[in-house]
Amino acid sequence: MGEFQIQQSFFDQYLGKLRHVAEIIDLAPEVVEILSKPKRTIIVSIPVRMDNGKTRVFTAYRVQFNDARGPMKGGFRYHPDVNLDEVKALAALMMLKTAVVNIPYGGSKGGVKCNPKEMSRRELEVLTREYAKALAPFIGPDIDIPAPDVNTDAQVMAWFLDEYNKVVGKVVPGVVTGKPLSIGGSGGRGEATGRGVFFIGLEAASKLNVSLKDARVSIQGFGNVAFNAAKFFYELGSKIVAVSNSKGGIYNPDGLNIYKVMEVKRKEGSVTKYSEAEIISREDPLTVDCDILIPAALEGQITEKNAGNVKAKMIIEGANGPTTPEADKILSEKGVFIVPDILANAGGVVVSYFEWVQNRMGYYWSEKEVDDKLKTIMVNAFNDVYEVSNKYNVDMRTGAYITSINRIVGAMKSLGWI
């Protein structure tokens, strides 16, 4: 029950921020109501015959929040803690995220309550294909476009695409993004979220007159987003002083060799096996001595209990919802500059958009073209939010919400919804 309450409050956090922004920009009550409720919520039960011959039934979700600005877009995750409130909150954040970077999408999210680490490859494939069949009537390149998220990857997208193609009787590469290159994926997609975090860090540093060379960077997480962000900062000359995964963390004030850490993680299954560092807990990267903190694990990690111990001057949110509202207030009073999730980690959805565009026109760009276009969009989005936050004298999170909501409301007005 306690876990459910934590997840349930995640959507309440979104609603609280929405109401706060509504007061600042004087939104009509009916607009707030539309933005408080998903357009469609899909809950399905998926029976899967397991390798031991027994059948298990998995609960799966897809929440489609708003499509005023275009087809809905959002990943789906496989995790034991997946529940409706979490998926609903993440769908709302996706709606804001696509608007803040000004790409023509709405927001959605999906998830299956399961533990993929305890499932075989065959079981995961069957689960994915059944999930695709269940969602097929409600998704499509003009309706809702899934993508990878926690514990899902390019292979999962390939299985999903294949099953969707069978259901509709034709090849529709644009129905999912984050696919392997061999079936219409985009160059640069795998690194996109981490690269976007890095581009945002560069822009934020330039605004605050901070040098990233020799800057001490601490990262909670060491999955795809965390590793790629770490890699780009490391190559620039920043010191990555701490990283962590689900089994624990490591800290070295003189900096970690990111490539060696990844090699150890792949061989041994945990970063804690890296010998040239002190072993710390998986939460400790949040509070070690550093200049820049990148929370890139799950939501709700920086709370009122540990926010006072955060030593970073800048936080770039690689994860979705890593900072609670109570922690936000504490950090703001300390003068910490926070680049919020809906801006900082939008690189993945931007390159997903590029993949969708390339699929639709049947013409593919080089990885350099993708990276250049990604940088342009991320830099423009940062500056849009920075200007709005200065105009209204608010923090960057509130500025990002105002930027997004103004764009969504503009679309709803044009369509005659309000």
Image (cartoon, grey):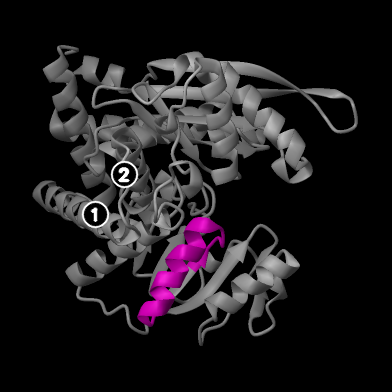
Magenta region, residue range: 219-238
Q: Can residue 15 be spotted in the picture? A: yes
- Indicate whether 402 appears above or below 234: above
Q: Nearer the viewer, residue 200 or 161?
A: 161
Q: Which residue has dot 1 on it?
A: 373
Q: Which image quarter is the C terminus in? A: top left
- Indicate whether 60 appears above or below 405: above
Is residue 237 part of the magenta span, yes or no? yes
Expressed as whole percent of the image width and height from the top left, the position of residue 168 reads: 50, 16
Type of amino acid under label 1: Lys
Type of amino acid under label 2: Phe
Residue lying at the far bottom in this picture: please name it: 254
**Disc sitting over residue 354 in the figure:** 2
Residues at badges 1 and 2 in contact (C-beta under 8 Å)?
yes
Expressed as whole percent of the image width and height from the top left, the position of residue 108 reads: 41, 29
Residue occupying the point 48% across, 41% down: 183
